[in-house]
Structure formats: C-alpha cells, structure tokens
Image (cartoon, rainbow, N blue to C red):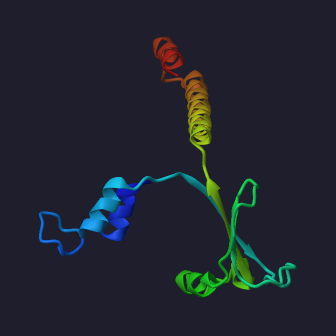
Amino acid sequence: MGIEDFKKAGGGELPNVTGGDSTSPADWQKMCDEVKTVATKSAQVWLQKDLEGLGWDRGSGLITALGLSFSTWADMTPTLTSERAWRGGPTRSALDTARSVAYFCDVLPDGEIEKLQSEVRGEAVQSIRGELSATANAHRLAASKSPEMGALQRRAAWKLF
C-alpha cells in the first residue's frame, strides 16, 4: 500500500479547478507526486472495561512517543457505535460487550519488513512442501495398493511424487 492506494481511496481525480490538463487541484497533484509513505504496524484491542475501569481517569486521548513496541496509543471508543452498526445482524458476539477500544500503532522499519517478508515466504514454502509431501505420500500409498497399476506405473508414481 502506498500513494497509489491513497489516490484511489481519496479520489486521485478531482474536479478540475486549475484550468490545466490535470483533473486535480494543483496542491492535491503536488501532494500525490511528492508524498512519501511509511509502513506501519497496528493493533486494535476491544476491552470490556471503559477507560476509568481500566484505571485511566484523564479522559479520551492520543498518546505518542511511548518508547514501547507500539509507540502510539489512541482511545477509539467513539468507533464502537459505527463498528456495531456495520457488523449489524442478529448474531451476538463477545465484541458486543466492549466498553472501550484502543488502537496501538508504530512505524515498521524497512529491516523488519524484509525480515517479515522472508519469514512469511519461508513459512509459505514450508507449508507448501508439507502439503505436497503429504499428497505425494497419499499417491504412493494408493499406487502401491492398486491392483490395476502395473510395476512401471508404480515406479513412475514414485518418481513423480
């Protein structure tokens, strides 16, 4: 995700108010051309106690520069109404009892992105290998038990899988 996603979501093409070739205002176009993006990590936590019940008596807020693995905390309790309306329906959930919502976020350094990508790739390859191995073993077993399959076909099945 980056500026191209933002342009799509934010209306990369706005009514022409500059009279030029662009269909976007000059300031909007400049922002789209020059803005830099940064990867982030985040967590959304729904809690069964309100802020006061959690021991916070200073009201809603946003606090940053915490120096923790998530450097920013924001009370997002006001989102509960729209979140519940969006989920809608008769299905009840433990989330229906939430009394507060906390968002945590921080920058995801490039080195960490590369590490996570590598881990995900490694896990995906390992998972695929495991599934292929299980499938191959199932085919080998089926081939070894098949009276219709000749010796040549069984050897081929062992080589294929």
Where, by quadrant of the figure, is residue 79 drawn? bottom right
Which percent across, then down, holds residue 40?
57, 55
Which percent across, then down, holds residue 63?
71, 70
Give left or right: position of 49 versus 73.
right
Q: Is residue 108 above or below residue 43?
A: above
Give left or right: position of 30 versus 99.
left
Residue located 24% across and 70% down the image: 25
Residue located 51% across and 13% down the image: 155
Residue located 60% across and 84% down the image: 84
Q: Nearer the viewer, residue 140 or 28?
A: 28
Q: Nearer the viewer, residue 127 or 25?
A: 25
Which quarter shows the N terminus? bottom left
Give left or right: position of 50 versus 107.
right
Which percent across, then down, holds residue 80?
63, 83
Where, by quadrant of the figure, is residue 56 drawn? bottom right
Which percent across, then down, holds residue 44?
66, 68
Q: Nearer the viewer, residue 42 or 135?
A: 42
Q: Is residue 13 visible?
A: no
Q: Is residue 152 above or below residue 67?
A: above
Q: Is residue 97 above or below residue 42?
A: below
Figure label count: 0
Q: Is residue 5 visible?
A: yes
Q: Nearer the viewer, residue 50 or 97?
A: 50
Where, by quadrant of the figure, is residue 121 drawn? top right
